[in-house]
Structures are given as structure tokens and as C-alpha cells.
Image (cartoon, helix red, strand yellow):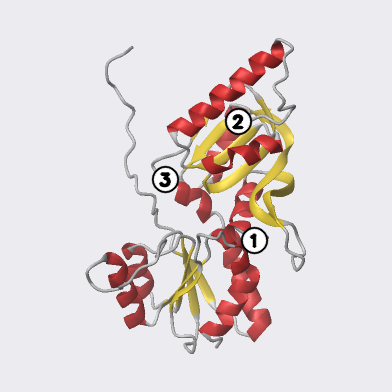
């Protein structure tokens, strides 16, 4: 069977670590490079429940999107849950490899998987990466168009129907009857890229973790610019403005769509490189932290 080192080499060819953001540290987190990899499991987060399920199933390699460690640490002891996760993985001989922002930006990675699922064609990266070795355009997020324009309410339903189930669902901001043709998609937290979305001039932006103040500011600025254009006053932005149309998705759900590609791409690439085909499974438990959403029912204004 293929060794962990051989599988890691394949993963880092599909999802090159050089694509990762400077603050990010994806790659192999736990594992003996000499161990054989007969079976692989995919999951959004390396939570305790996910790790325990992987260990119980005898998984040799757990591939997650979100890192176990976002920041440098000085101990992996039993004083914290991360140390306990490392202990469980090590004792079971289960490796952990993380494809985070490197997988976001890769061809057939997280961004492309979501954009494809939402029906976008003629795609390009939202934030391109200049990689002479890449055969296809790569970079964070995707921008594309729908084959046929549709009302925002219909496109939002398409997004919701394509996502794995969570209690949180999706939130929509904008005129529900507005015609949507061009769309930017950024799985993960996306309000840091409003300038890039503005430059793309799209009709709608699909992302996650939109915070109140950045979104409110973007909406107010877009409405103000529109009112000034209606008065014949240009503010220097041309056609590159954020339109007040946002679809906010559950973070883990939109990023889990990547596995629909990875579960085929990874074993195929391992087979081509080593002649061995590992079995794969998706630990699809919902790792979104919210398990109940209630409408507020307080005093009417």
C-alpha cells in the first residue's frame, strides 16, 4: 500500500502549500510518514467527535479543511483538547492532514466546488494566484455567471438546496426580485474581500460569517453610490461597486462541498502515483456550532 509520505506528496500536488495565506499553516499535522494508508476519511473540522469516529473506523488518514492549530503552540499535553486529539490520533496510528487556504485556492478546490454546485460558468478566481506551474487559473474564491439570469429568491434557494444540511440555513440581503447574472463566491469568512468583490462588479456575493458592521457599511455605501448616480453624479467608482445583494451561508457547510470533488480526485491521484487505491469516506457530521435557530419574538417596534 501507499505510504503516508506518498499520499502527502499527492495531496500537496493537488493542493499546493504555496497557495496558503501567509498566516496559515496547512499540511501534515500528525502522522508517521512510514505508515501505510489503506483508507482515508474527509471531514470539515478535526473535532473530538470527528476524530473519535475516524479512530473507531480504523482510518489511516483524516483529511480536514480546518486546522487543528490556527496559532503556534508550545505544548500538546492533556491540559487541552488539542493535546488530547493529538494523543488519540497518535495512539491509533491515524494521521491528520489539513488542506485549508491552499485547498481554497486550488483547481477543483473549495472555491471551485462551491461555484460549480451553484451553477456558475465561465469562472475565474476572485483573487488570482500567479503560478506558472498551474494548468488552470487558481486563486481564492470564484467569479462566474449563471447560464440564465434568475431572481435573487430563486438563486438563494439554489444555494440553500446545494449546501449540506445545518440548522443555521442561509441569510439573504437584497431585493428578492432582483435579477442575478454574475456571482462571486468565497467559501469561508468573506467580509475581508469586499474591495475585491467591488472590483469584480458582480450582482451577488455568496460567502460566510458576514458581520453586522462590515455588511451594513457595504450596503449603505452601495445605496449611496446608486442614489448619486441616479442624480448624475459619479463618485469615481465607475461600474465597480458592491451591489447590496449578499447570501450568507454556514461556514462548515459551504466548505464541505469540496469533498464532493476530493473524494474522487485524491484516490485517483494516489492510484496514478503509486498503483494503490485507498478507500475513502466522508465523515459528514455537522460541525457547525449552532444546533438551534429560533426567530426572535420580542416587542414589536
Mark 3–mark 2 distance (CA, rounded to whole Å)? 20 Å
Dividing the picture into quadrants, the one containing residue 85 is bottom left
Is residue 173 visible from the viewing direction of this image? no
The foreground one among 66 and 260 is: 66
- Give percent across and percent down for residue 61: 46, 76
Q: Looking at the image, tell me whether mark 2 or mark 1 is earlier in sequence order.
A: 1
Q: Which mark is residue 106?
A: 1
Residue indicated by mark 3:
166
The foreground one among 59 and 79 is: 79
Residue indicated by mark 2:
154
- Give percent across and percent down for residue 25: 49, 66
Mark 1–mark 3 distance (CA, rounded to whole Å)? 26 Å
Residue at image point 53% right, 65% down? 99
Of helix, strand and loop, which one carries label 2? helix
Dividing the picture into quadrants, the one containing residue 278 is bottom right
The foreground one among 208 and 154 is: 208
Amino acid at each position: 500500500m501507499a505510504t503516508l509520505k506518498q499520499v502527502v506528496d499527492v495531496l500537496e500536488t493537488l493542493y499546493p502549500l504555496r497557495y496558503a495565506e501567509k498566516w496559515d499553516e496547512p499540511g501534515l499535522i500528525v502522522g508517521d510518514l512510514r505508515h501505510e494508508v489503506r483508507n482515508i476519511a474527509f471531514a470539515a473540522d478535526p473535532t473530538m467527535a470527528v476524530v473519535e469516529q475516524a479512530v473507531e473506523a480504523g482510518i489511516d488518514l483524516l483529511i480536514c479543511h480546518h486546522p487543528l492549530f490556527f496559532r503556534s503552540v508550545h505544548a500538546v499535553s492533556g491540559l487541552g483538547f488539542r493535546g488530547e486529539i493529538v494523543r488519540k490520533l497518535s495512539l491509533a496510528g491515524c494521521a491528520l492532514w489539513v488542506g485549508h487556504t491552499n485547498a481554497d485556492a486550488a483547481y477543483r478546490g473549495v472555491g471551485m466546488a462551491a461555484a460549480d454546485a451553484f451553477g456558475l460558468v465561465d469562472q475565474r478566481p476572485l483573487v488570482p494566484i500567479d503560478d506558472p506551474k498551474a494548468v488552470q487559473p487558481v486563486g481564492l474564491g470564484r467569479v462566474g455567471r449563471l447560464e440564465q439570469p434568475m431572481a435573487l429568491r430563486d438563486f438563494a434557494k439554489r444555494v440553500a438546496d446545494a449546501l449540506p444540511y445545518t440548522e443555521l440555513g442561509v441569510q439573504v440581503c437584497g431585493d428578492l426580485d432582483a435579477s442575478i447574472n454574475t456571482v462571486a463566491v468565497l467559501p469561508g469568512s468573506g467580509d475581508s474581500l469586499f474591495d475585491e468583490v467591488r472590483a469584480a462588479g458582480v450582482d451577488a456575493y455568496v460567502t460566510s460569517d458576514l458581520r453586522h458592521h462590515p455588511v451594513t457599511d457595504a450596503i449603505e455605501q452601495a445605496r449611496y453610490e446608486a442614489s448619486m448616480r441616479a442624480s448624475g453624479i459619479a463618485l469615481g467608482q465607475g461600474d465597480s461597486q458592491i451591489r447590496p445583494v449578499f447570501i450568507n451561508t454556514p461556514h462548515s457547510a459551504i466548505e464541505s462541498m469540496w469533498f464532493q470533488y476530493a473524494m474522487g480526485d485524491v484516490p485517483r491521484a494516489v492510484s496514478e502515483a503509486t498503483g494503490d487505491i485507498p478507500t475513502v469516506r466522508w465523515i459528514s457530521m455537522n460541525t457547525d456550532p449552532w444546533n438551534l435557530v429560533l426567530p426572535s419574538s420580542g416587542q414589536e417596534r
